[in-house]
Image (cartoon, grey):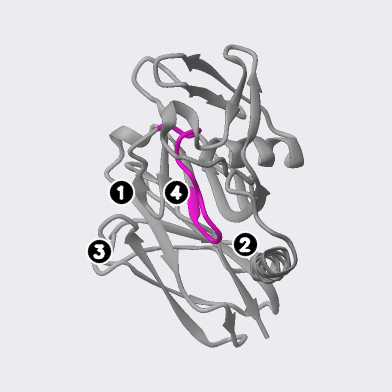
Amino acid sequence: MLFQTYLILHTLALAWFAIGTPVAPDVNIGTVVNLRIEGAEKTIFEGPIFTRGHNVTTVAGGNHHCDGTNNHENPRPGPTCTSALDSAGKEHGFTFDGTFDPEFDDFFITRIGDSPQTATQFWGILVGFEFTPVGGCQQRVHLGDDVLWAFDAFSKNHFLKLAGPVTARSGQPVRFMVTDGMTGGGVAGARVVASGRGAGSQVSDASGHVTFTFNARGVHDLKADRDDSIRSNGVSVLVV
C-alpha cells in the first residue's frame, strides 16, 4: 500500500511537471524504486525509495557523480542503482563503503551495513531479477523497478521470490508460492517464516508451494530463505 501511494504521488508530480514546465534535455528527474538489500545474515532494507542521480561519497572511494552518465553509459543524468542505495542509507540510517575505479568511472561496493565482502563473497546488483550489465552508477533505474543488492550473489543457486494473497480470513488456509525470480520455476525446500502469534514456518513442497492458516487477525509478514539461495522479497498479509 505504501509503495502504491508513492507511485501515485510520483506519477502525478511528473505529469504536473511535464505539463507545466518545459523539460531541459539534461534535467535529472527523480523516481521511486522498490529497493531490497539482502545482507549476509539478514535483510538490511526493503521498501520504496525516492532517488535521483547525485554525487555519492564513500570512505574508500571518495566523492563522485553517480547519475547514469558515468563512463558515458547514458546521455542524460538520472537515478541509478547506487544512488538508490545511497538515498536509502541516508534516509534509514545504514552505511556502505566501496572503492572507485576511474577506468569504469564507477564504485565497486565492498560493504553494506554489517556485511563486508570476503575473498570469495561479493555484492551483486539485479534489476527485475536480472544482473545488471554495468556498474551501479551506470545502471539507470525507472519508476517501479525492483532493485536488489545481494551479498554473495555470484555463488547462489536461486534468487527467491515469494508470491501470494495480500488478504486472508482467520482460520482459513491460504497458499503462497516460492519461485526462482530468474527462471520462474518453483523452488522446493525453502523455509517460509511468518510473523505473528501462532503463524510459525513452513517448508515449500516440490512445486514451491506452502500453506498457512492464520488464527490471529492483523498483519503477518512472510519471507522465504534457503541456505543456497538469496532470501525472497517480503509479503504482508492482512488477516481479517
Sequence-earlier tag: 2 or 3: 3
Residue 158 circle label? 1
Closest to the observer, 208 or 172: 208
Sequence-earlier tag: 4 or 3: 3
Q: CA distance from mark 1 to mark 3?
A: 10 Å
Look at label 1 and name its amino acid: His
Q: CA distance from mark 1 to mark 4?
A: 9 Å
Look at label 2 and name its amino acid: Ser
Q: Secondary structure at mark 3?
A: loop
Q: Which residues are magenta?
A: 135-147
Q: Which residue is mark 4?
A: 231
Q: CA distance from mark 4 to mark 3?
A: 16 Å
Closest to the observer, 25 or 197: 25
Within 10 angstroms of label 1, few (less than 14), some, or many (20 or more) residues? many
Q: Which residue is mark 2?
A: 195
Q: CA distance from mark 2 to mark 3?
A: 26 Å
Q: Are marks 4 and 2 in contact (CB under 8 Å)?
A: no
Q: Position of residue 238 (x, y in %)?
A: 65, 77
Q: What residue is shown at x 24% (from left), y 66% (from top)?
A: 206
Q: Which residue is mark 3?
A: 185
Between circles 1 and 2, the one closer to the viewer is: 1
Is 121 placed left or right of 22 in the picture?
Answer: left
